[in-house]
Each structure stands twice: as C-alpha cells, then as structure tokens.
Image: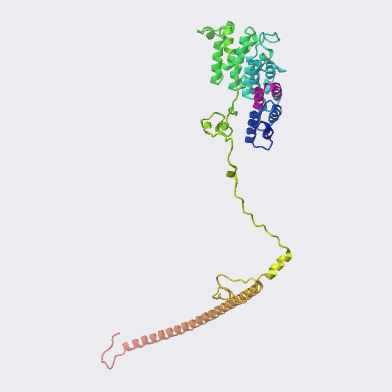
Amino acid sequence: NLFAPFYSRFLVRTDDLLQVKQDKIKLLLRIVGADNYPVILRELIDYADDPDDSVVSNSIRGIGRCARLIPESMQQCLNSLIGMIKSSQDAVISNAVLVLKHLVQMQLSTPSDLPSTSQSPITIIAQLARKIDDIHHAQARACVVWMVGQYAGTEEKGPGPEGVAAWASDVLRKAAKTFSQETPLVKVQIISLAAKLFVLSPNDRVLTLLSQYVFSLARYDVNYDVRDRARMISSLLAGVTPASLMNGPERERAGVVLRREQVKLVLFEGKSGIVEDQSGQTIDGSLIGSLSMVTGRSMRLDGMLPDWLENGVESSLRDADEPTPLAVPVALSSAQQQQRVKGSSPVVLTPTGGSSPVGPPSKNGLAQGPFKDLDKFYEDTDDVEGEDEEEEEEEEEDEDGEEEVSSDEDGDADDGDGEDADADDDEDEDEDEDEDEDEDDGDVDTRQPDSKAGTTSLP
C-alpha cells in the first residue's frame, strides 16, 4: 500500500538493464490491486514480447499471479494466455502453457469461488491438445499430455471411443508416432496417457493397440526411468488387459491383480493438486530493507532491526555549517589592462645558477648586468653565441694546421732514415773489401820465411 499510488514509476522501459526489468516486474506484482490491475496487466502482456527469455517468463507468470490474486481479472488473463499459444516464440508458448495449467487446475478444483468465464477449462484443454504439434518445449509438452490424460474422461457420446474425448485419442496417436524422438520427461507422460485412456475405454480395440504399442516401445527404451515406468504400468493393468493381448510371461505372473475401478483410482485420484511456483516472490509482511526482502524467505535477523521513530530526530543534527563565500573574479576591460601594464615595474631576469652572460651575482643576490628588458637579454645572448661559434671555428683551424705540420715532420724523418741506411750499406761493403785484402796478405806471409824470427810461421 505504500507504493501502490506510485505504480507508474515502476513501469519497465526499453533502455532498462535486465536486472532492473526483473526487479520492476516483481515490484509491480507486489503493488497490484483492484484499482490498478488493468494498467499493470496490460503492461505485463506487453512485456511478453521482450527479446530476453527471462523477462518473458517473469511477465507471463505475473499474468497468472494477477489472475490468482484478483478473480475479476481471470477472463482477461485467460484470453491473453490463449492468444500467446499462437505465438512463434517457444519461450512464450511454453510459459503460457505452464500458467494455463495452474489456472485450469484452480478453476476445476474450486469452481464456485471463481467468476464464470466465457471458456470452460475443458475447452481450454481441448485447444491446447489441438496445438500439441506447435509446442516444442519439453516441460510444456509434458504439461499438455498430462492435462489431456487427466481430464479426458467424458460421459457425452462423440465420434471417438466411449467415455473418452475425441481430442484425447488423437493426442495419443500423435504421441505414439513421435515417441522415440521425445525427451524422457515427455515419454513418461505419454505412458501415463496411454494407461489412462485404456482404463477409461478398455473395450476399444484402437486404444488398446495404441497402448500396447507405446508399452512395447518404452520397455526397450535406453532410459531407466522410462523402462521402469512401462513395467510398473503394465503390471498395474494386468487385471484390465484382455487375455488375448497378454504374452505368456504376463499371464503366468503371480501377485495381486487390481480391478478396473481400483486402477482408475490409482491413476486419477490425488493428481490435481495445484503447485504454485514461488520463485522470485517475497514473503508477505516482510520489512522493507530487511534481508528477507532480498532472499525471499524469513530470516532470524529481521527481528533485530530497530523500530521506526515516531517523532524523528532534531533538525539541528542535519544542519551543516554555512560555507565561506568564494572570491568572485572581476573582469577587466582592455583599457584597464593597458593602464595596469604601464604602471607596473619592469621585470628583471635573474639567473639562479650556472654560468650567466651577465657575470657573477653581487652580494645582494642581484645580477650586475645592465639588462632592463627581455630584448636586450636576448641580443647579448645572440652575441655570446656568435663569439662561441667563432672560437670553435678558430680551434678547428688550429687543429688542422697542427695535423699538417706533424705530417711534414714524419716525411723528413723518413728521408733521413733512408740516407743513414745507404751510408751503413757503403761502410759494410768497405769492411768486406778490407777483410779480403787481409786474408790475401796472410796467405803470402805463410809461404815466405820470417827473417827476423829465424823460424817459419805455420799456416
């Protein structure tokens, strides 16, 4: 009741995030009432066209919740759900079938408490049975097959078997053709459908053959649950099946054999309980902001929350100190700026470190140069750079001259070394000639006797 007058603030928009859409749908279902249900119901019907499957599922389940909470909206909800069965989207069809199942069960279980509708529950089931080929979702197909078998009995005489609606036997025929292609969930419901129709009309030969055909397929299925369900149903129908259709092992089977009335009681009674999907629903009476609102179940810590204050708190606790006003900048005109520039003192550039073209600073820390403006400083800087370049050029020229002088000295040294080598060669030749002459003189002396010594010198 707190947010009910403001339900328009929680309508879903196309640019909302996925989680925001889901939360808005939950809030709309919480505040729906007798005054605002027409608008909220139309919104939920529009949300069924959302591209996201989770939003589609929540919106269609919300339609069923509106039908349960507000009985006056039952007819509008049924019309919208039946129209959704003709949709081309599997998510829409499957969720619509699941919600219709709950509504049909509710109408059949408590017919006096609900307002009369233009379509009876049996008519709705007949429409679902004729649309069985267009329903591809496994759980939705299983729901349709279960409803067909549960509510197929009739006392009216028709073109079909006695005691069975004509559309029920046609569903069994279609299911028997596609039995091997169905999922295990659907196969189990097809076995139950065959058993229920056989019990309702045991004398009809077509239904008997269809039932036996389905039991034979299920007996050799690859799934354990399907095989176990087929064996259990076959044993349960042992007292109803004609002896001509029973095999040898089945005839000799010992144990309790149930009559037709007992088998009908086992198959049909106690299966119409309404199981409502409680996912995504919050507990009634839960506090706003508590943990139970988030988890969807009662929490022990919710009782520890403090109660709301009746008188509130003093307003002085919420008062803040006044902020100090900021200085407002003043805009200056061009004339005022020129006057301010003329009246200002000239700027003196003072280097803080390193070598400066001005010279070393004085004792008071100011430069000793005559610079009064920036132009003179840059002119002197250019002159200094020019002098540096000239000095570099002179140094390069000096280096080139030194290299030439060193190369000339190396050449003279090479020439002197050549002359000394020639002189040394001449001296060596003279020494060789003197040695040859000495050898010749020695040979002559050995042949002539030495007159002074009186002896002859041996060679």
Visible in this render: residue 234?
A: yes
Judge from the rendering whether residue 420 lies leftward or rightward of residue 283; answer left or right.
left
As drawn, 236 above or below 343: above
As for residue 243 lying within the magenta part, the answer is no
Where residue 49 sits in the image (x, y, percent)? 69, 30
Q: Between residues 134 and 15, which one lies in front from this camera angle?
A: 15
Where residue 220 sits in the image (x, y, percent)? 56, 17
Predominant SS along the magenta part: helix
Instruction: Give the quadrant of residue 219.
Output: top right
The quarter of the picture where the C terminus appears is: bottom left
Where residue 397 sits in the image (x, y, percent)? 59, 78
Q: Residue at x 60, y 42 (%)?
A: 315
Judge from the rendering whether residue 365 lies leftward or rightward of residue 78; answer left or right.
left
The quarter of the picture where the N terminus appears is: top right
Q: Residue at x 62, y 19 (%)?
A: 179
Visible in this render: residue 175?
A: no
Q: Magenta segment range?
A: 59-80
As drawn, 114 above or below 37: above
Where residue 227 sits in the image (x, y, percent)? 55, 17
Q: Between residues 215 and 451, which one lies in front from this camera angle?
A: 215
As drawn, 249 above or below 184: above
Instruction: Give the quadrant of residue 4.
Output: top right
